Image (cartoon, rainbow, N blue to C red):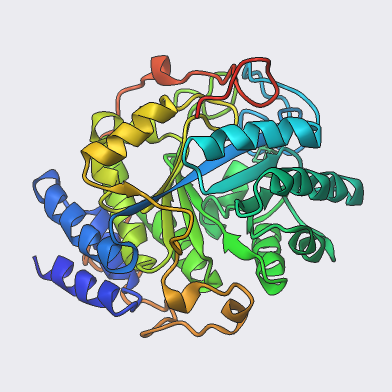
Amino acid sequence: MDLLNTLVDKGLRRETPTRAEALAVLATGDDDLLDVVAAAGKVRRRWFGRRVKLNYLVNLKSGLCPEDCSYCSQRLGSKAEVLTYTWLKPGQAAAAAEAGVAGGAKRVCLVASGRGPTGRDVERVADTIAAIKERDTDVEICVCLGLLSEGQAARLREAGAHAYNHNLNTAEAVYGDICTTHGFADRVDTVQRARAEGLSACSGLIAGMGETDQDLVDVVFALRELDVDSVPVNFLIPFTGTPMAGEWALTPQRCLRILAMVRFVCPDIEVRVAGGREIHLRTLQPLALHIANAIFLGDYLTSEGQAGKADLDMITDAGFEVEERDAATLPEHRRDPVAAGDRVLDGDGDGDGDGDGDGDGDGDGPVRETAGSARADLVAVRRRGAGTDLPPNA
Ligand code: SF4
């Protein structure tokens, strides 16, 4: 297939594909699915070998958020029966982080619900980072606290954070459909603030919220243009008690095409299969490892993942290896987040695309697939780990 040959060539050169090419990946049929996975796999192996980086989530503060993100079980007015608790103490968070690290995680992601942190919150997180580093100086720490204001990114960096996560989630054009309490530009601003202060920028998306192919391509190009270092790809977990309950628009094949498109647009960037992996990819999960180079180990913020041991077995069975502590995740040209501020995009790098969104029959228009079957039985609320008396699933 000419398209796939072109995309592999561009991926090996770190060149950005056109929007039309990215859209064409999403429009491929099931007969071509394994060819798409194999092509994305060539790009993945060029930049990341067969390594799988394990990330471990610690929800520092759960639920009761004043924002109204419609996909989120912690949102204002959420009726989802998720754990709700206020800030974990540094020692509690460090104990949870330790379990994830013992399970093989290289990065710990410290997350708190809310619009954004107060100065006091940032200090609590600084204390938590210190408590984690006291037990293990080398663990990589990513922080996710919502919208950042002036000076907060610098303080987190000084406290020992390596990265900051703030997802764009969906395209600017439809952002108002999923959230009214903050905007797309607010999210972009926080990613830029984090990056400007030398934090490695982690920002991704959620697929399966009713978006078009054009929307998906738009958000991935926006992430490419922000030059983030890692892109978590979430598949909507349609919690009962949120406005998105019952939204089952994804199939396992669709998830793989989305991951492949992200890999081609972001060839040398960490692509992580994030929330919703188990419930949407189901038995095709191992194929995703040929495209993505990172996953979350065990549970998510408010929902359960498969057992951490099952994650490790899947990696081994699929012929991949857990990324070791001393291995660098990113290719050499991306390793220094401070220097990354001066990094120049490669290839055409402008993401200007061509033939995009014009309905000219080149396959770039919105393509809606047959929705997946509703599988609400697969959504399990997290009841163990951080904020509970039960041991974490790691
Ligand atoms: S700001 Fe974060 S925690 Fe709050 S509703 Fe939105 S996604 Fe959920």
In this view of the protein, can residue 248 be seen by the observer? no
| Residue 189, percent from left and from top | 70, 65
Near-viewer residue (162 or 360): 162
Residue 287 vertical position relative to residue 189 in the rendered view, above or below? above
Residue 158 vertical position relative to residue 251 in the rendered view, above or below? below
| Residue 297, percent from left and from top | 46, 36
Q: Residue at x 33, y 79 (%)?
A: 15
| Residue 216, percent from left and from top | 41, 55
Q: Quadrant of the N terminus?
A: bottom left
Near-viewer residue (225 or 172): 225
Q: Residue at x 44, y 76 (%)?
A: 332
Image position of 153 (left or right of 140): right
Q: Quadrant of ligand 1?
A: top right
Near-viewer residue (254 or 378): 378
- Residue that protrudes farthest toward the right in the picture: 120
| Residue 381, percent from left and from top | 55, 19
In this view of the protein, can residue 344 be seen by the observer? yes
Which quadrant of the view contains residue 300?
Answer: top right
Which quadrant of the view contains residue 13?
Answer: bottom left
Residue 22 vertical position relative to residue 394 in the rendered view, above or below? below
Near-viewer residue (262 or 238): 262
Q: Residue at x 21, y 45 (%)?
A: 319
Q: Residue at x 24, y 35 (%)?
A: 284
